[in-house]
Amino acid sequence: MEKIPPVHPREILLEEFLQPMDISQNQAELANGRHNVAIGAVFWGDGQILAWPLA
């Protein structure tokens, strides 16, 4: 089985969510009701990815 290199959360956020939805980090943060630093911190490697409640 071939190992793949680690993927930074920034790549996942960009390729799986932000680009397909054609939204910015700020728009994603506002839609989730999070402070505008939350996704940016994950994006730049300073934060953690946590489960967010959907309700």
Image: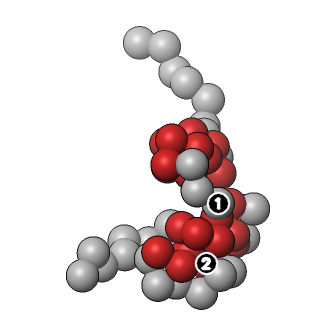
Residue 3: horizontal and vertical position, in percent? Answer: 52, 21
Q: Residue at x 61, y 78 (%)?
A: 38
At label 2, the amino acid type is Ala
Asked which secondary structure carries label 2, the reply is helix
Label 2 crowding class (10 Å Cα cut-off): few <14, some 14-19, many 20+? some
Residues at marks 1 and 2, CA–CA distance in whole angstroms: 13 Å
At label 1, the amino acid type is Ser
Residue nearest the viewer, comparing 16 with 6: 16
Q: Is residue 30 above or below residue 40?
A: below
The residue positioned farthest toward the left in the image shown: 55
Name the mark on residue 49.
none
On the picture, is 12 further left or further right than 26? left
Who comes first in sequence, dot 1 or dot 2?
1
On the picture, is 52 further left or further right than 29? left
Q: Quadrant of residue 6?
A: top right
Q: Is residue 11 above or below residue 51?
A: above
Q: Residue at x 49, y 49 (%)?
A: 21
Residue nearest the viewer, comparing 27 with 4: 27
Q: Which residue is mark 1?
A: 24
Q: Which residue is mark 2?
A: 38
